[in-house]
Amino acid sequence: MPKLNDVVVRTSNLTVKFRYNVALDNLNLEINRGRTLLLGSNGSGKTTLMRVLSGLRRPTEGSVEVLGLDPFKEPSELYSRVLYVRDIEDLPYMMRVSTVVELLSDVYGSDRVEKAVKTLGLEEHLFKRIGELSKGLRRRVSMIEPLSSKAELIMMDEPLSGLDAESRVIIAKALSNFPNNISLIIASHIPLGLGIDQMVVLEGGKLTYDGPYNVDVAKKYLTWMDALT
Ligand SMILES: Nc1ncnc2c1ncn2[C@@H]1O[C@H](COP(=O)(O)OP(=O)(O)OP(=O)(O)O)[C@@H](O)[C@H]1O
């Protein structure tokens, strides 16, 4: 059993129902400090879980605790300690990358943000609007905040999916180099190495595996294309 302060997320009988389906089905889960891979096929409930954990969707039944906080009763403390990197389609399309950099610099300080921009190889794209960027570059823009932030827990949805080779390498390297004192929950429909401490697998909104990184479980989620690379 992990020590109490090792647990960053706890869900109790968590259920989220939509009109025609159940996205999370009576989920009892503990996620520990460190790097967690949240694996599952498309539609298995990964995004819904992260939305509940970041206070964006209320459970239909059950409860969650994130860093010991109730996201629905203590949202301001939650937002100061937890960061959820949303889908890149949510980025403001008309905004220039330089404006994103300025806004984030006001929050996290220009030193941290400039370092992140450099790590992500974005210096030559600062004048462009987000809507003009390729998917890989947009993903890199979405990584400026997690790399600059001082959050204790960062959740990311599919950070490596559908990227060109250069962006994939840059982001994978940035993820591997995250400081150990920041806990990461990375949702993905394909398995990722990246020094994973805990692997959680969801299928049809239910927990099907919870434990250390397991190659046999992971390889069921490798697509034929990933197997070639
Ligand atoms: N706003 C919504 N309204 C209705 N159904 C929804 C909504 N959001 C999610 N669902 C459904 O809940 C289930 C879980 O979806 P979710 O997006 O959490 O899965 P996922 O594992 O993140 O999938 P993906 O990898 O495709 O993003 C799916 O059946 C999905 O269609």
Image: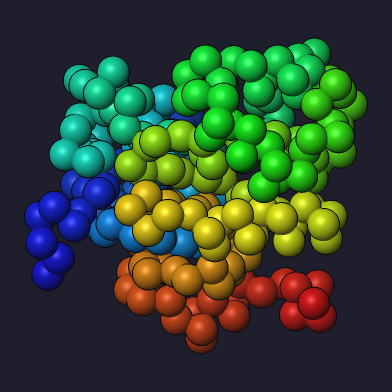
In which quarter of the view is residue 137 placed?
A: top right
Q: Residue furthest bottom?
A: 216
Tell which of 106 and 164 is nearer to you.
106
Vertical position of residue 108 compared to residue 25: above or below = above
Instruction: Please state which of residues 168 and 106 is positioned toward the viewer in this rendering.
Output: 106
Residue 89 screen position, x and y as percent: 71, 30
Is residue 15 visible in the rendered image? The answer is yes
Residue that appears at 25% across and 23% down = 77
Left or right, 14 with respect to 123, comes to left
Q: Residue at x 36, y 76 (%)?
A: 212
Does residue 139 appear in the picture of this structure? Answer: no
Residue 7, compared with residue 110, is above or below; it is below
> Relative to 157, is 56 on the left or the right?
left
Vertical side of 205 occupied by 60: above or below: above
For the image shown, how many numbered marks are present on the structure?
0
Residue placed at 86% from the left, 34% from the top? 124
Q: Farthest residue in the right direction?
A: 132
The spot of residue 225 in percent (x, y) is 81, 72
Q: Is residue 4 above or below residue 54?
A: below
Q: Is residue 141 left or right of residue 123?
A: left
Q: Quadrant of the C terminus?
A: bottom right
Q: Which residue: 37% across, 50% down?
A: 182
**Which quadrant of the figure contains the N terminus?**
bottom left
Residue 99, percent from left and from top: 70, 15
